[in-house]
Image: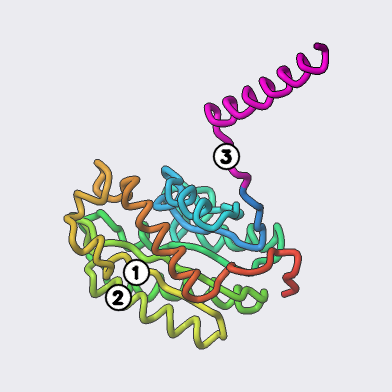
Amino acid sequence: MKKKTLLIFAAMSVAFAMIIGFTTGCEPQLEERDCVVMLGDSIFALSEDETAYLEDLSGHIYRHYYQNGAQLEGGSIIARDDIEDQYDDAIRDGDIRTIIMDGGGNDMLLGGDMEYSEELQAEIFAAWNRILDKAASDGVNNIVIQGYYVTDSGGVTIEDLIQTENYLLAAGAERGLNLVYVNPATDSWFANRRPSQYTTFDGIHPTEAASERLANMVWDAMVANNIEQGAGCRYFNP
């Protein structure tokens, strides 16, 4: 009788554990991959929706240095650091194999009514050059740059965004960097929608659906270019 009671108790315990597992769920633990850093502005930082989607897709947690209001050139609007400063902070904290970043939106007055001038463009490209020079010198292997989409009120056109893409691809190649550019301005998901459909009430920042689309674009580009698809950071010797 005692043996039968123990067997019944054991069976009930297993069933209870299964019910608890089904009802509470269990979130998989993401692996930290600290040789990958994210730099940029509020497109990443404001809601961090894109970061969450991207890290779920990759199964990894990356180091984050992006800040709301960050600029490439001329300091920042509200951020403590501009994007070059973010890079400097990140490399001081440890070796970098891959950078995932955006930048220049606040410089280009995305969402503003001021004209994107040749003088401003030259300043932005100079800032990009400084960051890319540092990355090449520090042994960074990969840089994934996410560009910007077009907004209703922005002074930046799709032609400006394509020009930035072409410039950065050439600049990365000159330095021997595996630089990949993700351009939402030419993506069909964005092109088939009005800006008001993929931006929040402020007309600038991405909705959650747009953040998910951006994360998928970045991850697809990383997969296509074999970026962070293999061994973890412990095998990395810059």
Tag 2 residue = 162
Residue 134 vs 55, above or below: the answer is below
Q: Position of residue 159 (x, y in %)?
A: 23, 75
Is residue 101 visible to us here?
yes
Instruction: Identify which residue, 176 or 76, lies in the foreground.
Output: 176
Tag 3 residue = 27
Q: Position of residue 203 (x, y in %)?
A: 24, 48
Instruction: Identify which residue, 103 or 126, lies in the foreground.
Output: 103
**Earlier-in-chain disc, 1 versus 2:** 2
Q: CA distance from mark 1 to mark 2?
A: 8 Å
Q: Residues within 10 Å of mark 3 (few under 14, many from 20)?
A: few
Residue drawn at point x = 66 percent, y = 58 percent: 34
Question: What span is in magenta?
Answer: 1-29
Labelled pair 1, 2 in contact (Cβ < 8 Å): yes
**Earlier-in-chain disc, 3 versus 2:** 3
Task: Tell me which amino acid carries mark 3.
Answer: Glu
Q: Secondary structure at mark 2?
A: helix
Task: Tell me which amino acid carries mark 2.
Answer: Ile
Residue 61 vs 220, above or below: the answer is above
Instruction: Please check the rendered image and state whether residue 19 is part of the magenta-colored stretch, yes or no.
Output: yes
Residue 22 vs 119, above or below: the answer is above
